Amino acid sequence: MITLSNPNLTFSNDANPETVVPKGLTSIAFRPGFSVLSVGANTLVPVVAALATSLRMTRQATPEPPVSGEAAEPPSHGVPRFGELLRRHRIDRGATQRQLADLSTVSVRAIRDLELGKAHRPRRDTVQLIAEGLGLTGQERAHFEKAAGGSANELKLSYETGPVPPPAPMDTLVGREAEVWMLGDLLGTGNLRLVSITGLPGIGKSRIALEIAGFLHREHRLPVLWSSAPTQSCATRDTGSEPLSGLVGAALNLPAAAAAVTLQAELRTLVGDQPTLLVMDGYERAGIDATALAALLQHCRGLRVLITARTPFQLPGEREFPLAPLAVPGERAEANLNELAEIGSVKLLTRCIARPGFRLTTANAPAISALCRLLDGIPDSLQLAASWFMVYTAETLLEYVRTDPFAFVTDDLRTSLRTELAALDHDERALLGRLGELDSWSMSDVSRLGHREPAGCARLVRRLLMHGMARTSAGPDSGHFAVLELVKYLGPERRSALHRLEDEAAS
């Protein structure tokens, strides 16, 4: 009971925790911070923020009493009943049901019914709105959405109703046909069960995983369980099967959820021996319970796992697939416009240019080709460069990129390349600088320039390829390689860049 200094007005929230009841008046909805109560026909009494704060603090300190006749349902399968979990999150954040309703745009009645267990199967969009209103992210959100999905039997029913699809891609994949066919065939036949697609930031790991998952879903009728790291974009996080995705995340993510062991057992039961594709998109080794993932593969004999990550997880049976940049045109490729237009990097760049009337011509072909080479055929960099065509011609943009290519790439890519360069020892950096002076080079060039035995040359070249600092040149079977143009820009031949890298490594 809270009483104002005015003896004629006494406010009580005993009857309903979401209302303020002036003595002798009907209930009026209460909003923390400010309210206006009607007294009689024409009198308005403002309730100041102090009263709002007092009521809110009282609500935080005093647990809501259970509704008479409502028995709390016990947690199911180690996951708290959704209503209990919702109420706990709301109280932890010091919010009333009315406040949460305002933040989430879900009605007070719907929130109250969920907390009391009167509504057992909330709509997916309702759960998402409430999670946004509560500010839930990462593991908390995955667990919250999992709790809303119902019991293991309900999940299994939705899983077995039909093959669960992957997220829908937002565009057409360019220049990755060979990779999709190869990995799709190996995973579809079960010849490989654990594949990690690795590569530089912006190289297109998530996008090719979407294409492979779609291929396996269409051609092999595999259900797809897709789980994206919290850092991933929305484009790959909405799968249309949030309870299933939430279960995967809660069972395999680190730090482990309180009920992780139970959730892992539930996931094993759900998948069983049915051929299934599990995609772990954008995770790093430190964010995944590798032991639980390995146990899942052991128990579920039909399961295939596809991981996209900066570096491999180094799990037993894992096959690493380093994703190379898109093909770039040679120095004189613009001589044939039709052939130039079909090269992966050129096709992506020209498709992303949103300037009315733009087309590839003999006049702009040299600049377009040079842009693709300078940006190394990295999809994100090409898409970013395409946005500048609204204000620059191809020739003007090329001059800017030549001056500072890192102004047209993401910060993640710049940081990743610097980290990889700093990890090389002094001799390796010096050799990389000499190789960077060549348009392309072979293993014999590495041996000649580095004074190394064949095995040492092979290890270095493999390391450069696996870590994205070099690429194959003139086709995968040519035996020739090239240092990335972006790496050359930061490479040892630029002394100031080298000194900066060594200073960063020393600190």
Image: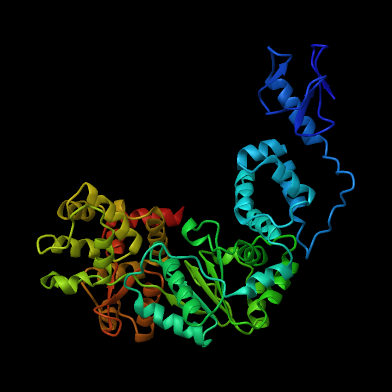
- Which corner quadrant holds the N terminus? top right
Q: Does residue 417 sit above or below 28 in this rendering? A: below
Residue in the picture at 36% in, 69% down: 173
> Splitting the image into 4 quarters, where does residue 122 fall?
bottom right
| Percent coordinates x, y for residue 497 in the rendering | 31, 55
Q: Is residue 232 left or right of residue 171?
A: right
Residue at the extreme right: 69
Residue 233 appears in the picture as rendered: no
Type of colouring: rainbow
In the displayed structure, 360 sits above or below 316; it is above
Q: In x, y percent, where is residue 318?
A: 54, 80
Extreme-front residue of the structure: 41
How many numbered markers are drawn?
A: 0
Q: Residue at x 33, y 64 (%)?
A: 378
| Residue 46 locus on image (x, y percent) | 68, 16
Residue 395 visible to an observer of this rendering:
yes
Which residue: 28% across, 55% down?
A: 385
- Res. 193 image quadrant: bottom right
The answer to which quarter of the image holds residue 145 is: bottom right
Above or below — where is 442 with respect to 307? below
Which x, y percent locates residue 28?
Answer: 73, 26
In the image, 382 versus 338, the foreground residue is 338
Viewed as shown, does residue 23 lie left or right of 280?
Answer: right
Instruction: Tell me what residue is drawn at x 83 percent, y 39 percent.
Output: 63
Q: Is residue 56 above or below residue 383?
A: above
